[in-house]
Image: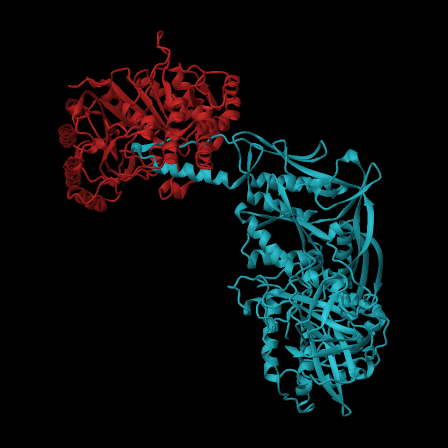
Chain colours: A red, B cyan
Amino acid sequence: MLRSAFPLVSHLPPRKPPPVRPARPPPVRPYASSAARPSPPPASAYVHLPFCRKRCLYCDFPIVALGSSSSSPVNGEGNDPRIADYVRLLLREVAATRPVSNDGVPLETVFFGGGTPSLVPPRLVAAVLDALRGKFGLSASPEVSIEMDPGTFDAAKLRELVGLGVNRVSLGVQAFQEDLLRACGRAHGLREVHEAVGIVTACEGLQNWSMDLISSLPHQTEEMWEESLRCTVDARPTHVSVYDLQIEQGTKFGQLYTPGVHPLPSETDSANFYKIASKRLSEAGYNHYEISSYCKTGYECKHNVTYWQNRSFYAFGLGSASYINGVRFSRPRRMKEYADWVQKLEIGAWSHEPDSAGMKDMAMDVVMLSLRTAWGLDLRSFSKSFGKSLTVSLCNTFRPFVESGLVIVMDMERRALQPSDFKLDLQYEGEIESKVAFIRLSDPDGFLLSNELISLAFGVIAP
Amino acid sequence: MATATATATASRLAVPAPRPSPAAPGRRRPAALSPAPVGRPRALSAASRGRVVCPAAPASASPSTSDAGQDRLQKVPISNIRNFSIIAHIDHGKSTLADKLLELTGTVQKRDMKEQFLDNMDLERERGITIKLQAARMRYVMNNEPYCLNLIDTPGHVDFSYEVSRSLAACEGALLVVDASQGVEAQTLANVYLALENNLEIIPVLNKIDLPGAEPDRVAQEIEEIIGMDCSNAIRCSAKEGIGITEILDAIVTKIPPPQDTAKSPLRALIFDSYYDPYRGVIVYFRVVDGRIKKGDKICFMASGKEFVADEIGVLSPKQMQVNELYAGEVGYLSASIRSVADARVGDTITHYSKRAERALPGYSEATPMVFCGLFPIDADQFEELREALEKLQLNDAALKFEPESSSAMGFGFRCGFLGLLHMEIVQERLEREYNLNLIITAPSVVYHVNLADDETVECSNPSLLPEPGKRRSIEEPYVKIEMLTPKEYIGPIMELGQERRGEFKEMNFITENRASVVYELPLAEMVGDFFDQLKSRSKGYASMEYSLIGYRESNLVKLDIQINGDPVEALSTIVHRDKAYSVGRALTQKLKELIPRQMFRVPIQACIGAKVIASEALSAIRKDVLSKCYGGDISRKKKLLKKQAEGKKRMKAIGRVDVPQEAFMAVLKLEKEVL
């Protein structure tokens, strides 16, 4: 049984700097490399397991709804031939994928996302893990995450998964109110939520798990949201993901609701929910390390951090998106087209286009991803990759927001600086390195307006 | 008929649905004869711009005049020349009557007439602008004596009253055509007065007597009462049915005096129109007043001082037909490789280079723009295209003035001056439709006289350039006298309109039992908005109006500024009467609040007079704009959304820190036209 969760992810700067640091600590600057030279080979893999009992009313992901025909609520779908067929396809894709490097960079993280991966029988999950291990190798202590929904697993199934090497569970609870669960079209009720939390917390060998919640659901009130947060804190997960409901076109919710209009909470209420989450979870000792992610110190989701640091990663399965050699590629979202694509891959009729995105797009990726995090944007590294003048323009654009508190400037040790320090520094023709090293969006106000702020930055990058 | 022009119509401001390409204002162009219009994209065919085909008419089909039309180029003694124009309100039958005159004199074949007539109607309907005959030489035989009749048409809109006056000055008489089922309209009156000023013999004609609702007696009485003209012998006709046409032709011969025989004097010819032809240069229409002009003569325009050689001279009948010589009393055209209509302005006098006339004909004046507005391309890249388009239009429109202007909100554009509102609309329309330019048009402004503290007086037509309050002593604004003719039941609403527009009531007269003339004096600025539309809507379309400039008067005017987040938006500044400043300020700030997207901070929107805020709104700050999912590393969709958001910001103009969409400017400018 693999124990996961080395509390400190080596490349992540800790929230508080250790007492002794070299004058210039080398925090990982992944995007610097991605822009200037070939990116390091992927050490992460995303695996899409698209099966769900039914589609939730807000969901627009590539999923396969199996229907609730099964007799056993927990393992009924296990023998569904569609799952086995799909996993065979998945294994073919893994087999047909050429590792980016031949010097054997092993996978540090694997993430089984969905869909509802917990509907997939553990033996099939094992087959995928084996294939990945055989193809790319797994590091000595990889983070292996799986998304699980209440009502789709029991203690035995979880034990089995943990036995296979799964060491992080992302539990899709979404809400602690029966009515809200029903309103979302979730395939489980409140009872299953409590059972699932019980199973996960009682599971020997599973230290690291995330409670996933959705805020701004229809009919959700501030009291309900406080209750969900209270229940979450009480369950003591190492990680909490709080997703703000997005109303997507083409979903049932898209037909039914308009953002900000009853029964959805108003924009003000919705912003308030975000602030409450930030407050309550911080009080309970969670770090708000990314727009929608909170964790106990050291329990960042290493896999997701890969995305935010703009590092490359493999992806396998229906509709999944990979980022290899500077190229982002999304697989077909329809099963038939995906199967055809796998076949092309097998016969060598498909390969990643060697040309990578332009510098502007690269810079946009870096900005958009890094500003999602509490670590923020590394200005020195950005300047190195994309030029001083762009960096200075970016800072100038953000300056009014530093003053208004939406953007925070930080020094090398990630200590917040006064807005006046930012001003001073900019006066030295791009000598931003002197004191200001990072900029980040403030929590919660800056995070809440992240789209506005990031799109402003986009306007600077691509005028 | 043979030519198209931008004559005023009842719907001059309520510009009707698609108008293809109104001819340049006041520039009556013989479309049938000019090979291609000025500066017009080739894609726009002749048909689409209102060209009316009028083939030469070699033979006459009219039994009464046998084939008199064929020899219309033949010379007649000066005593047998009659030069006249037709004065009529839109829809009162001018085009039909002109058609019938051409037909009966064999100038144009009947078959061709019909086609033209239909074309005319379509175009009129589409453009709301009368298509009219430019000039036509007809031969008419009466009592076995051949006469040469020259019909010179006029534009009918006050914007072009100068051009009208020059056309009338080229005539000795005019037909006053009034619809016997309706009555005299304001515009008709204005032109009758102009004709009387030019000592023209006026022949009243009551048209449409075939209509069941025709009341020729009543209308004749109306003309007598309003104009004070004897109508006992008014000709009753139906141009449509061909009734009374011969009587009209006879009356032209017997009542209108011939031109004076001054063929031996030095050449003086009055230019009453000109248009630009891209192949031949400017074509000049003129009436020879004194002397004679021959092909190949070296000529000189006395006002512009330009000299040319008359490569070609001819008559319009109605198509251009070359002749070798024209003498006093005759009407014709010439081409002389003239590059811009500015060199051959309406009203200028043509004389011989070597044997100059002592003095020019009276009445020449430069075009004085009365209304100004800023034209800005929505897409900054179109600035050069806009300049080129304006230059091309100017080739054919000497009254159009423009100079570059820049504004922090609108970027680079031009401040343009126009004769009036119709002129402005026509130019805007042509720029947008013929040159495919997308324009932001600022609210029209008049020319203010600003009396400065140091006793100097400056003109100002751009609110953002108004001198500071401390530097100015007073502001004067142009006033117009406006006469509105209306059925009596709309007198109330029309007087309300006059009052609302700061009008000073002057007089009201019942011209008949049921119709009244209401006269106001009011600021021109109050008319440049939607006054005409309001007049029409408040009278269910029955009222008509006419105005003339009566000078400048001091008014309690203030400059109203708009500030967004404390930053002034120059392009939205306006000059308004103090009493109206509050309501205008409120309307503008409310509109802006509707249209400016919320920002990351609270944005006050204020209307100010100097430092004093008189109306205020505020946009609340955005509370939340966050995409929380970043699923499975698929950032492409999120990035697309953010890019779209960034694009949206780019399309906006930054006013200080606030992004304001173009649409907000446009809507506010439109609102300014309505509320000012």
Name the residue: 84% across, 80% down. B232
Residue B544 lies in quadrant: bottom right
Q: How many marks?
A: 0
> Can see residue A299?
yes
Query: Does the rendering let one see residue B513?
Result: no
- Asked if A124 appears above or below B10 in the picture, the reply is above
Relative depth, front residue between A324 and A336: A324
Which quadrant would the N terminus of chain A be assigned to in this image? top left
Q: Position of residue B607 (x, y in %)?
A: 67, 36
In this picture, residue B178 sits left or right of residue A358: right
Residue B604 % position (x, y): 61, 32
Q: Nearer the viewer, residue B587 or A331?
A: A331
Please tell me whether residue B459 is drawn above or below residue B259 in the rendered image.
above
Name which residue lies at 58% across and 54% down: B388
Residue extending farthest to the top is A19
Horizontal and vertical percent for residue A262? 46, 37
Check the image and report above or below for A128 versus B120. Answer: above
Q: Is residue A157 above or below residue B185?
A: above
- Kindly indicate the quadrant of the structure image that contains residue A326: top left
**Residue B178 locus on image (x, y percent):** 75, 74
